[in-house]
Amino acid sequence: MAKAKQNIKKMPEHERPREKLIARGAAALADQELLAILLGKGSRKYDVITLAQKIIPVIDEKGEKLTIEDLTEFDGIGNAKAALILAANEFSRRRIQPEGIRIEIPADLLPHIRHYADRKQEHFLCASVNGANEIINIRVVSIGLIDRSHAHPREVFADPLMDRASGVILAHNHPAGTLKPSAQDIETTERLQQAGEIMGISVLDHIIFNSTDYYSFLEEGVEF
């Protein structure tokens, strides 16, 4: 415990998560810094920032299905901390959610997914939209390199079917390198587009993004 506190104290005061939030606002903090504030302190094994970094992939993958048990598997996370994280997650979901926001151009989706840009692994996302191009929900489908197994139609379309979505917008972050789609990206998109046609759900676009820019299959005229 003491080690985790000592690591935070060694940071310049203006870079400590809580002080940084007070001085610059919550939007200035990375995801692990925001979660570190909720955690308060680390564990016997990890300082609070490292612990937050380890928990975030689970939160990304589980999304709204996150449970107490998912969180308490981590050393230093008991029922109280897990409950705090779940409560914060649900509270923000109810008030600050993209549901109902209309997507006119691909860039309209970016503010709602940009926080995945700094992930070290690729996160494959699926935004369900209704017939008016309004967002129903945005979910993480898989984490890891995008390939046929990670972006299987069964996983991609399971929730949009439950949403009664008329279309989906696919997206994934590129942690490094060019935003230009790879041959695998194009093949995967074609496969999902074909599967969507069978189920009556249109694949409207596939967006590849990082923290500063994006590539849209639709805008670039990539046929799939």
Image (spheres, rainbow, N blue to C red):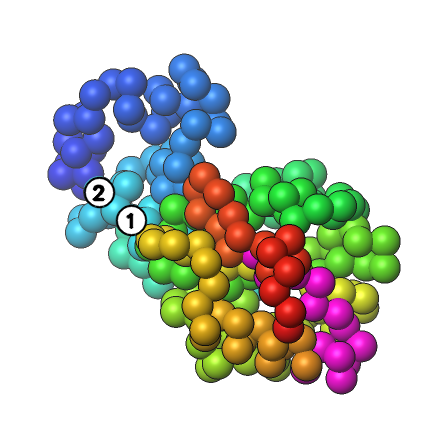
Pick the residue in front: 97 or 206.
206
Residue 99 sits above or below residue 172 on the image: above
Which portion, as a residue range, is magenta? Answer: 195-207
Question: Which label is found at residue 51?
Answer: 1
Helix, strand or loop under label 1: helix
Please provide percent x and percent y for residue 119: 38, 51
Q: Is residue 116 magenta?
A: no
Q: Is residue 139 left or right of residue 166?
A: left
Residue under pointer 2: 47
Pick the residue in front: 181 or 203.
181
Residue 101 sits above or below residue 20 on the image: below
Q: Is residue 129 left or right of residue 64?
A: right
Q: Quadrant of the N terminus?
A: top left
Residue 84 sits above or below residue 70 on the image: above
Q: Residue at x 54, y 67 (%)?
A: 141
Helix, strand or loop under label 2: loop
Q: Residue at x 37, y 42 (%)?
A: 32
Q: Are marks 1 and 2 in contact (CB under 8 Å)?
A: yes
> Would you identify the image quadrant in which residue 159 lies?
bottom right
Residue 155 sits above or below residue 175 on the image: below
Q: Is residue 109 left or right of residue 35?
A: right
Task: Say few, some or many: other residues with alpha carbon within 10 Å of mark 1 (under 14 / 14 to 19 / 20 or more).
Answer: many
Please provide percent x and percent y for residue 161: 74, 73
Pick the residue in front: 16 or 156.
156
Please provide percent x and percent y for residue 167: 75, 65
Amino acid beneath label 2: Asp
Q: Residue at x 66, y 39 (%)?
A: 96
Q: Quadrant of the C terminus?
A: bottom right
Please provide percent x and percent y for residue 109: 64, 47
> Would you identify the image quadrant in which residue 41 lies?
top left
